[in-house]
Amino acid sequence: MDYQLLFDQYNAKQSGPKQSQQRRLYHCLRAAILRGQCKAGTVLPGSRSLAAELKISRNTVLYAYEHLVAEGLLCSGGRSTVVADSLPTFTSSVKDADIARPHTLSARARLTPWPSDPHGAFTAFMSGVPALSHFPIAVWRRCLERVWRTINHQQLDYADAAGEPILRAAIAEHLTGTRGVVCNAGQIFITDGTQQSLGICAHALAGVGDRAWIENPGYGGAFQSLKAAELNVRGIAVDVDGIAPTEKEWEKFTPKLIYTTPSHQFPLGSVMSIDRRIALIGSAKKYGAIIIEDDYDSEFRRDGPPLPAMQGLVADAPVIYLGTFSKTLFPALRIGYMVVPTGLVEPFAGMLKLGHLRGRSADQLALAEFLRAGHFAMHLKKMRRLYATRRDALVVAIDKHLGDVATIYGGSSGIHLSVGLPGLLNDVSISESAIAQGVYTQPLSRLATGKVLCNGLMLGYAQVHEREIEKYVRILAKIIHSH
């Protein structure tokens, strides 16, 4: 240990009347022991050696050591002085200004975490995880290699805060052709994913205390992003057609922002009808609200073609469209995007230039090639077939082993479905028991954004081989029936 540094740092922190060298060294060593910097069993330097290192008298060191031995913090025996193995308990009356007070998080940072994080290891029915073993790594690697062969030194600098122009253009082409989004490349802003997109929208479009609506039950990540921006978040109940605000709620709890997942409601999986979409846009215009449309897994609809995005349904719709490649490609890519109305392009661009991290040009250029060369469309086609097979296997297994207690929601699209359970069953307790056996299921009650309206479990099936699905459902069924 560098005792000179320890001594100097202690002296620099002191205020008030100047202390003697003896008292300063005593307090310095005492604080270091109580903070754990000098751990139990540490052999301290001899008095002559420490005095020489600190350029103080030997008597000063002896004074400090003797007082610390008397307090039970040090043990002296033979030729060495050692930090005690067990430290005495000091009463609250002992004055010790040297022990730092613990730092606490601000109110907006006190989020509610899910009790375990199984990411990085296979866990059956983990939601939001695509079939990573089926991603064409070799094709992606070739795209990256071609980019790195052609990239120039200027592209190693900080990039455009809005993202690489070629990627923005490729995304605009894809969205126009497949999702009915009406946009040009200038309206697209590249982000690190949906969470960052939500944070940007919340800070750009609403002030502290403004009201934001979110579906109930709904996406916890969106709920936390809006709360972190210090908005007044209100959960709005969903039905078979999606988020269903009443006229009374529009008038009494008028929102500034509305977050919705119309293509595959998270977590119940309902698809918002065209009539409901147009009505929501009309009311948003009437009350001056902006809709945040999260189209997180719309590419995987199986009961007919995907419904067109809300963004392109009505001219000048007050909609910001969010997309991500985490579900269609792989989460570690960390590339998402926003499509903002033309009137917001300039202020968004200005805001992002001030605080948005800019870079990762190679990944963005490789993704642009992946899109334009047709690899993305080919991968989606393959994944739709795979996910349909796995969804069907899961539905069969649920009917077979849980048909007496479970109701299936949202199996028509996406990469997850939910099962409703009778209210007398505790979905949180069931989920915790399942996690202990390698089966990850999110309890629907934990996804409430207001009053708890649903009891059940959300199951992601994309990464589970169809031959293995029944095995894991049997484990889950045994747990549910035991409850």
Image: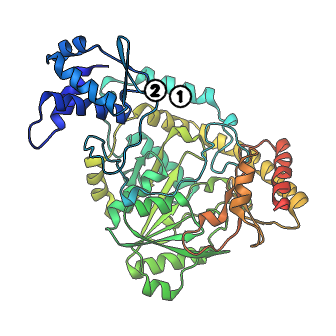
Q: Quadrant of residue 399?
A: bottom right
Q: Residue 133, image x and y in percent?
A: 69, 34
Q: How crowded is mark 2: few (under 14 residues within 10 Å), some or many (20 or more)?
A: some
> Which is more toward the observer, 390 or 312?
390
Residue at the far left: name it.
17
Q: Residue 306, image x and y in percent?
A: 65, 60
Residue on which disc 2 sits: 147
Q: Is residue 32 above or below residue 392?
A: above
- Distance (Cα) linking label 1 and label 2: 6 Å
Residue at the location (30% across, 46% down)?
Answer: 94
Lateral position of residue 66 relative to residue 394, left or right? left
Q: Is mark 2 on a helix, strand or loop?
A: helix
Q: Residue 141, image x and y in percent?
A: 56, 26
Quadrant location, the N terminus: top left
Quadrant location, the C terminus: bottom right
Q: Residue 121, image x and y in percent?
A: 66, 37
Tags 1 and 2 touching, CB below 8 Å: yes
Residue at the location (75% across, 51% down)?
Answer: 434
Q: In which quarter of the image is residue 328?
A: top right
The amino acid type of the residue labelled 1 equals: Cys
Q: In this view, does 56 lie above or below 302?
A: above
Q: How crowded is mark 1: few (under 14 residues within 10 Å), some or many (20 or more)?
A: many
Q: Quadrant of residue 308?
A: bottom right
Residue on which disc 1 sits: 143
The amino acid type of the residue labelled 2 equals: Val
